[in-house]
Image (cartoon, helix red, strand yellow):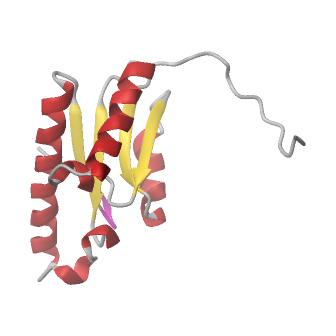
Amino acid sequence: MEKTLSYETPKEHYVADACVVWCYDDRFSGLLGALTKDLKNYDLVKVAGGAKALAGDPSPERNFVLGQITTSLRLHGTKRVVLMLHRDCGAYGGSKQFADPDAEAAFFKDQLAAARDFLKGEVGDLPVDAYFADFDGLFLLS
């Protein structure tokens, strides 16, 4: 093999402050950076639809995302999980699927609650934060 890039990577193992399940829609990458800027280390699960697979019925996608989260817990002693869904998500068909922005936000609130509730049943007492990303910021599900 030929080295194509020199970069010093830390060799020490780490404890992850969070495992972040995020949609790979690049419009929200800046928001991801803002959310994680104060975390020392985090594991990122970046998939189409973000937490969508955790909100639905059993599926290979749900098993994959759950497997990534549990691997983060096992390997890095992860302290919390962060779930994200966002407005105009192509994995859900985009904003055109909804009558108006309020209906879309209400739908994603329900989806986030379902994903969070499912995951809490799988990870016990580990904190799970669920966020809705919009084009003007990030909103924590209460």
Look at 84% across and 37% down and name the residue there.
6
Q: Is residue 135 positioned above or below 24 on the image?
A: below
Q: Quadrant of the C terminus?
A: top left
- In the visual, does 2 lie left or right of 77? right
Figure quadrant of residue 92: bottom left
Kindly tell me whether residue 139 is visible in this rendering: no
Q: Which image quadrant for residue 44?
A: top left
The magenta stretch is 134-138
In this view, 30 is above or below 136: above
Nearest the viewer among 60 and 142 is 60
Relative image position of residue 12 (x, y in whole percent) = 62, 15
> Residue visible at 44% across and 58% down?
24
The residue depicted at 45 percent of the width and 35 percent of the height is: 43
Q: Residue furthest right?
A: 2
Q: Position of residue 138 (x, y in %)?
A: 29, 54
Nearest the viewer among 11 and 71 is: 71
Q: Is residue 119 left or right of residue 50?
A: left
* Residue 34 visible here: yes
Number of marks present in the image shown? 0
User: Looking at the picture, how far across and down is residue 95, in whole percent?
Assistant: 24, 78
Q: Main secondary structure of the magenta part?
A: strand
In the figure, 13 relative to 47: above or below?
A: above
Q: Residue furthest top?
A: 12
Q: Quadrant of the N terminus?
A: top right
Q: Is residue 60 magenta?
A: no
Residue 122, position in %: x, y?
Answer: 18, 30
Q: Which residue is drawn at the image coordinates 39% and 28% (left, top)?
A: 71
Report the side of 136 relative to 10 (left or right). left
Foreground pick, 53 / 120: 53
Q: Which quadrant of the structure image shows residue 104?
A: bottom left
